[in-house]
Image (spheres, rainbow, N blue to C red):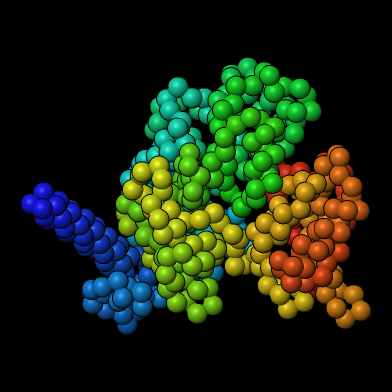
């Protein structure tokens, strides 16, 4: 009985210890949040304007923080070129920017500390994938104002691995170096990784390459594409997350357990909100990811709406690491298409296709307007041994059951649809032409 009482007491004390640790973490987390808010309000012209009339020193709880206005890429464009900058010019060592394909680009200035912090986070990403200083990392994303290539390289160098900075395109050179330099890791968009995988198979190079892992990012990608890349290159794939405004790629990654994307909560604070109402959602519910930077000097961001749809995963990863997780990105709020009154995200289409045997990873969505009604046609590639008529029937049936609208399906041979060296274009909405 004494032993049981002692064990019970130890259990209570352990629980108290856990609760105390949790309390300390929450206190530190909020103190970092408040420091970030005050810094942005005092030093960034963008946030000075946004918080005009708000006493940020009165933000004394998470509830207070949750009442602060969101920032958004559309507003950041109005701060072009350097209205977001929160330090003197002499502290800025680098500029990156968004593509600006849908308007003015968003210019993001970096201090030396920002660059260092980003490299530390990126090296951590590689470590979570089991990549070490003995690896040879072939970098295919673009360099320049885009954050991808230089981010992958900086993390590689921080880790102490060999960087092979090939950059985008030039598939002949990519394959030559992959074989001759015995690259063990490939970094790419999913679209380009698929293109490389198909070329390796077509040229019979599989026995000549030494790839073990692939770190893939920049666009969402479904299970069918993962399976094709993984099987055709015989590598394990890892989903890396990031966006230009928040350092770049490398702010989160999945590990060997593939239960979700770990994010670095010592640098970033994540919220999930209802994209329509802005209400903060509980862990486990899908919504829009909102990010606040704790330590970013050049361009701090407070409650920044990413427009990426995901959820916080409530449990701790079985890998045992303490960093929290979000789920894979389902899509973007601005990628949603509305057909016949139904909201559809690319992730839903990919999940639907994965339930149909004989379908490959590549597809196109073509939306038109005929006889006063919307019409959606799904063009899908099929595997060599498929009955295309049967596959088309099943795609239409499953789409109706899972998404709720009737569509047309056109099956084409493997390799018919275009391949991309950067991000894929899959949706063609012709209703407004």
Residue 429: percent from the left, percent from the top?
78, 66
Q: Please say if 356 is above or below 48.
A: above
Which quadrant holds residue 51?
bottom left
Residue 353: percent from the left, percent from the top?
74, 55
Q: Residue at x 71, y 68 (%)?
A: 403
Which quadrant holds residue 270?
bottom left
Q: Residue at x 31, y 80 (%)?
A: 54
Quarter of the picture holding the C terminus: bottom right
Residue 24: percent from the left, percent from the top?
19, 58
Q: Residue furthest front?
A: 1
Q: Residue at x 81, y 52 (%)?
A: 380
Viewer-proximal residue, 385 or 30?
A: 385
Q: Is residue 355 left or right of residue 143?
A: right
Q: Is residue 401 left or right of residue 299?
A: right
The reply to whether residue 79 is in sight is no
Viewer-proximal residue, 252 or 281?
A: 281
Number of numbered discs on residues: 0
The reply to whether residue 342 is in sight is yes
Q: Please say if 116 is above or below 273.
A: above
Which quadrant holds residue 346?
bottom right
Q: Please say if 78 is above or below 99.
A: below
Viewer-proximal residue, 16 or 264?
A: 16
Residue 13: percent from the left, percent from the top?
14, 55
Q: Residue at x 45, y 77 (%)?
A: 279
Q: Please say if 401 is above or below 127.
A: below
């Amino acid at each position: 009985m004494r032993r049981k009482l002692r064990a019970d007491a130890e259990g209570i004390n352990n629980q108290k210890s856990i609760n105390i640790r949790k309390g300390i973490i929450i206190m530190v987390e909020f103190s970092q949040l408040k420091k970030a808010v005050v810094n942005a309000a005092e030093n960034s012209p963008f946030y000075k304007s946004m918080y005009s009339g708000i006493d940020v020193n009165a933000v004394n709880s998470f509830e207070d923080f949750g009442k602060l206005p969101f920032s958004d890429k559309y507003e950041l464009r109005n701060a072009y070129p350097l209205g977001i900058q929160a330090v003197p010019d002499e502290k800025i060592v680098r500029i990156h920017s968004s593509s600006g394909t849908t308007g003015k680009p968003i210019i993001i200035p970096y201090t030396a500390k920002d660059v260092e912090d980003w490299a530390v986070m990126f090296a951590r990403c590689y470590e979570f994938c089991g990549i070490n200083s003995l690896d040879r990392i072939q970098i295919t994303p673009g360099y320049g104002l885009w954050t991808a290539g230089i981010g992958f390289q900086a993390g590689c160098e921080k880790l102490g691995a060999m960087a092979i900075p090939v950059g985008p395109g030039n598939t002949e050179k990519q394959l030559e170096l992959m074989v001759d330099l015995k690259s063990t890791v490939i970094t790419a968009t999913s679209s380009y990784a698929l293109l490389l995988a198909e070329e390796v198979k077509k040229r019979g190079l599989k026995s000549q390459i030494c790839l073990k892992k692939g770190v893939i990012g920049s666009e969402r990608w479904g299970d069918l594409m993962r399976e094709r890349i993984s099987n055709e290159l015989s590598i394990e794939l890892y989903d890396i997350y990031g966006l230009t405004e928040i350092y770049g790629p490398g702010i989160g990654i999945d590990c060997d357990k593939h239960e979700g994307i770990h994010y670095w909560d010592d640098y970033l604070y994540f919220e999930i909100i209802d994209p329509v109402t802005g209400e903060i959602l509980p862990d486990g519910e899908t919504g829009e990811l909102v990010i606040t930077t704790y330590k970013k000097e050049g361009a701090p961001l407070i409650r920044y709406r990413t427009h990426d749809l995901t959820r916080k995963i409530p449990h701790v990863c079985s890998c045992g690491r303490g960093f929290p997780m979000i789920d894979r990105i389902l899509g973007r709020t601005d990628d949603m298409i509305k057909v016949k009154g139904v909201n559809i995200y690319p992730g839903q289409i990919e999940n639907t296709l994965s339930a149909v045997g004989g379908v490959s990873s590549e597809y196109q969505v073509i939306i038109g307007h005929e006889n006063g009604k919307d019409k959606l046609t799904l063009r899908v590639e099929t595997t060599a041994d498929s009955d295309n008529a049967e596959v088309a029937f099943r795609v239409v049936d499953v789409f109706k059951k899972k998404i709720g609208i009737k569509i047309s399906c056109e099956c084409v041979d493997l390799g018919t649809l275009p391949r991309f060296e950067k991000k894929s274009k899959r949706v063609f909405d012709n209703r407004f032409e």
